[in-house]
Amino acid sequence: MFPVKGISGPPVQVGGGCSLLSPIVVENLVKTFRVAEREPGMWGAVRGLVRRRHRRVRALGGISFAVEPGELVGYIGPNGAGKSTTVKVLSGILVPDSGRCEVLGRVPWRERIALVRQLGVVFGQRTQLWWDLPVIESFDLLRAIYRVSERDHIRARDELIALLDLAPLLDVPVRQLSLGQRMRCDLAAALLHSPKLLFLDEPTIGLDAVSKLAVRDFVRRLNRERGVTVILTTHDMDDIEALCTRVIVIGEGRILSDGTLDDLRRRVTTERWLIVDLLEDDEVSDAQATVISREGSRVCLRFDPEEVAPAALIARITARHAVRDLFVENPPIEEIIARMYRGAAP
Amino acid sequence: MDSLRLYFRYLGVSVRSQMQYRGSFILLSIAHLFATGADFVGLWVLFHRFGSIKGWSLPEVALLYGMVSSAFAFADATSRGFAMFGETMVRTGEFDRILLRPCSVALQIAGQELTLRRVGRLSQSIPVLLWAAWSLHVVWSPAKAALALMTILGGACLFNGLFVLRGTLAFWTVESLEIMNTVTYGGVEASEYPLVIYPAWFRRFFTFVIPLACIGYFPALGILERTSAAGVPSFLPWVAPLAGPAFLCLTLQVWKLGVRHYQSTGS
Amino acid sequence: MSAYGAVISARFRMHLQYRAAAAAGFGTQLFWGVIRILIFGAFYRSTTAHQPMTYPQVVTYIWLSQALMRLIPWYAGDPDVRAAIRTGAVAYELLRPVDLYWTWFVRIIGASLAETALRAIPMFLVAGLFLGLQAPPSWASAGAWGLAMIGVVLLAGAMVTLLSVTMMWTISGEGVTYIVPTLAIVFSGLIVPLPFFPDWAQPILNVLPFRGMLDIPFRLYMGHIPSGQALPLFAQQMAWAVALIVIGRLLLARGTRRLVVQGG
């Protein structure tokens, strides 16, 4: 077991014990896009043929961060915040306007092929497997593409097949797989060449609950037991809560927050939520708590633990009402993020 | 080379995918054969009526037709990746995945598909070529046979170069430019007839800009031993087919520019 | 009408099976026309023998072909119908209280008219002004041509609809019918004007329905066929059209019953 640290703490020895360098270093990345403006309607379309007006969109306005080996980082933000732009720059697909970036010791867009050989990427929305071929043949083709030796390939492949329970799927053409099955195969495919760094983009999107848990479990083990550094881009906050020790929030091309989940929560608010299941339909109110919602006999209250101790509030509520059950929670992370985005909007 | 082996692997994958739809493949191949055979029917009818064109007889033009059509058959069958690049890769975002693989981008695109049914065109162009070879009053030699083969291969390179250009355009415009279709499909038809029948500007364009003359007309002059009559140096037929691969290399450089453009502007 | 609008606009985005149709934008067709004219020019200069048509007539014929070629059956069956059969959506069409045959018939006619109009107008303008497309020699010829064009639309529509109907018999919607478009291309005069075909072939060409799709209307236009012949030739077109419609309706009825029996 390797001690995994967040952004503070000494660098970690992982795997072969070679990499003391941060796998990802990003410094002041700037990227602006020229987006053609389409004028609405027929006349606009005609005018658009002759002269196109362009709008400058600042996708990245100077972001900086570093990722240590073995971290499992969540990279979240609203749509259009710059998440996919960042990932594209990191993988060498996009060239930034300015700034410094090094992934696994290489400048991505300059040494694309060398970098990509050590990188695994999974897109939740699109499979990288060949649609008409049985899974096992896709794996074999990937071996040829990544130039993995026969021995290494078989070892990695068989391990992944065991870990992800792919044995019954190997001879099935990809087009016949369910979404959950396909995702597991895509995960395996991305790891066949034993990359040190894994980018996951919406890996659990559209999956049923069981598959989501399987994917999360696999990623967690991959990170904790094998020290694979993972960058997870997702809208699913459950993924974040389940997996990430560190969360980077990006909004409108700027980094809004970079730290643990708790750091994130505390930045936005210290408030906690008290959920009460009443036995009878009562009106619940308290001087130091605000009712957020009420669904049948379930009431949700918001309070600030720095203003009133949770225990005191609970005592008051249970004294006044017949309570069947109650629990204290942090506000859901979506709520936190939403507030953060709203705060970020000018 | 590793890359070449990978390319053929890609093609193999494509063939196996298509083989799963075997029934329709056979029918479509036959249909394609008929469609492309219509060209030669036209040729035959006209020669039956007119006898000759600017001093070229039917077997002589058939030689030209056979070589160019065969070259196009190979190119057409292997071109789908670049020809449909805009629709299949850029618009859908699939191209990003291509960039995430540690091998040549062009090779992956080129290996996208081997459209088997288009090979059906060969089943009319090869017989035409063989018939022409048999009917011609020329003495065949291994050198001439090799020239014919080189011409076909060079032609396949050139046509593929045109498809690469067409795919490259997708980096800049959403609409596929009609001009590329004109030059590609129009070019095939035009080069199935001897260049002499066309006006000077046409001949110059298709000799120096898009060297279609080099993968049909000039080699044919060599095989038919008409170089002096046409006012063309006698060594030209033998080096002309090289224009095909040269053109392809040129277009691949332009392609690289396109990829760089994509990387700096996103999609 | 908006439903047809949707059909027609979808059609414009379709890829067709054959390279000629699939690739042919306006520029490509201009190029093809020019090349064909140059080829014919060279042929004419290579011989002094008498030809079935004069060179100016050939030029006009070629430009008429480029302008109006979308009227002939390019499809081995309406692609929308093929898609409907493949996905099973045809079952919905069978449930509607409209005559399915006429629906398909009108659909394909609407599509081909729209596609043709889009191509014919600029082609007539450009070729007429700059490239040698001549006007009809008389009003009578023009009228004869107009009548024949009506025949073409109905005849081609009937043929394509029949091909669409035959697709109900094959699982994936394909079949030997894929040959028909090629036959249409060759035997309508699109590749080479039909009068140039060998003399022994002319009776065969007269028997086939394709002659009435391009060759006959074009030659009426040019006066190559005297306008007096317009009516009998139109009758010939309509005879074929009617025959194809009757066969089509019969097959559709059989096919519908078959589909319903199999449980759709």
Image (cartoon, coloured by chain):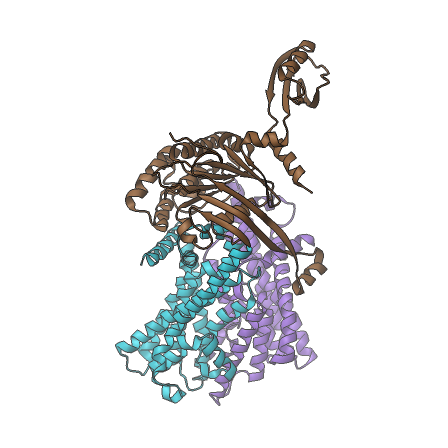
**Count of labels in the image:** 0
Estimate the x, y position of residue A317 in percent, counting from the top left.
67, 13
The front one of C244 and C191 is: C191
Which image quadrant for residue A234?
top right
Residue at 55 percent of width and 84 percent of height = C55
Estimate the x, y position of residue A238 in percent, counting from the top left.
54, 31
Q: Can you see residue B60?
A: yes
Q: Is residue A114 left or right of residue A247?
A: left
Which image quadrant for residue A334?
top right
Chain identity for the colour cyan used in the image = B
Question: What is chain A's hue in the picture?
Answer: brown
Estimate the x, y position of residue B149 in percent, counting from the top left.
33, 72
Question: What is chain C's hue in the picture?
Answer: purple
Q: Is residue B152 left or right of residue C119?
A: left
Q: Is residue B114 above or below residue C192?
A: above
Which image quadrant for residue A288?
top right
Q: Is residue B163 left or right of residue A43?
A: left
Estimate the x, y position of residue C214 in percent, counting from the top left.
57, 71
The front one of C219 and B155 is: B155
The front one of C172 and A121 is: A121
Q: Is residue B137 left or right of residue B112?
A: left
Extreme-left residue of the structure: B142
Q: The N terminus of chain C is located in which quarter?
A: bottom right
Q: Can you see residue B92?
A: no
The front one of B127 and B91 is: B91
